[in-house]
Amino acid sequence: MKTITAGNASNRSRLASRLWRSVGVSYLVLMLIACDNNEMLAGDVTGYNHMPDSGWSIAGFTINGAGGSNAQPGSGAGNSCCMSFPKHWQPGMKAKIRWVYDVKVGDPRTPPPPQEAEVDIPEYTTKTAGAVQVHFYSDHRVKVVISIYGLGHPRYPMTAEDKLPWVTRNDIVDE
């Protein structure tokens, strides 16, 4: 039977420390290489509450962990910074949205429980990528758009029906 002396324990501790540092540095190098190969973009996060008749407010939300602010019924949330996403869109890209409802002060109703959904991210290009915009609808539905265009712009990548209560402005002219 071998007895472990203080010197042996100290050597093992140093060896273990070196091993963990080596593993940590290797992991960091791999992460940097992966980030370099996955060109990323960043955009502000905003939300739109398409539920003016329900009275439900969006008390806050996240998209893939990036935070968004609250949105009153029939209004848009302020911009929050930022969410990163791949520079090049790929089929099957998804986003995980989590949100919490609230009511106006004095409203006796109990808001629905917190919600979570995973949704497709529609196609975007490097020329059209911009803000990450989350749309909240009745029946706990959500949609995501990544676009440089605002909700009222004719090139906003959403149908007129999905934009309601907002409408497309016809006075905007592209250059």
Image (cartoon, helix red, strand yellow):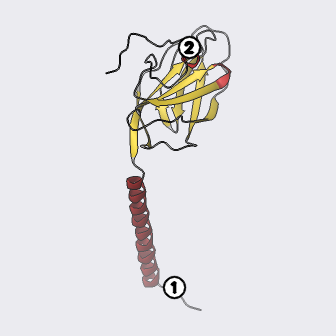
If the image is split into quadrants, where does the C terminus sit? top left
What residue lies at 44% left-to-right and 44% top-to-bottom? 88
Which amino acid type corresponds to the residue marked 2 in the rendered image?
Answer: Leu
The local secondary structure at tag 2 comes to loop
Q: In front here: 66 or 171?
A: 171
User: Extreme bottom residue here?
Assistant: 1
169 or 120: nearer the viewer: 169
Q: Residue placed at 66% from the left, 9% from the top? A: 108
Q: In this view, does 26 lie to the left or right of 72?
A: left
Quick one: which residue is furthest to the left in this view? 175
Instruction: Return the x and y of residue 106 as percentages of the image width and height.
Output: 60, 7
Residue 28, position in %: x, y? 40, 60
The residue located at (46%, 74%) in the rendering is 16
Residue 7 percent location from the top left of the image: 42, 83
The relative height of residue 91 versus residue 131 in the rendered view (above or below) is: below
Q: Which amino acid, mark 1?
A: Ile
Quarter assignment of residue 73: top right
From what the image shows, is residue 79 above or below residue 123? above
Q: Distance between the residues labelled 1 and 2?
A: 74 Å
Viewer-closest of 109 and 169: 169
Q: Which residue is drawn at 37% across and 14% down?
A: 172
Q: Residue 17, located in which quarter of the rendered image?
A: bottom left
Locate the N terminus and report the quarter of the image it occupies. Answer: bottom right
- Asked whether the beta carbons under mark 1 and mark 2 sit within 8 Å of each other, the answer is no
**136, above or below 20, in the image:** above
Q: Mark 1 points at which residue?
A: 4
- The answer to whether 160 appears left or right of 8 in the picture is right
N-terminal-most mark, 1 or 2 = 1
- The numbered mark at residue 153 is none
Whole-percent x, y for residue 60 in the image:
53, 25
Question: In the rendering, which numbered label is found on residue 164?
Answer: 2
Tally the marks: 2
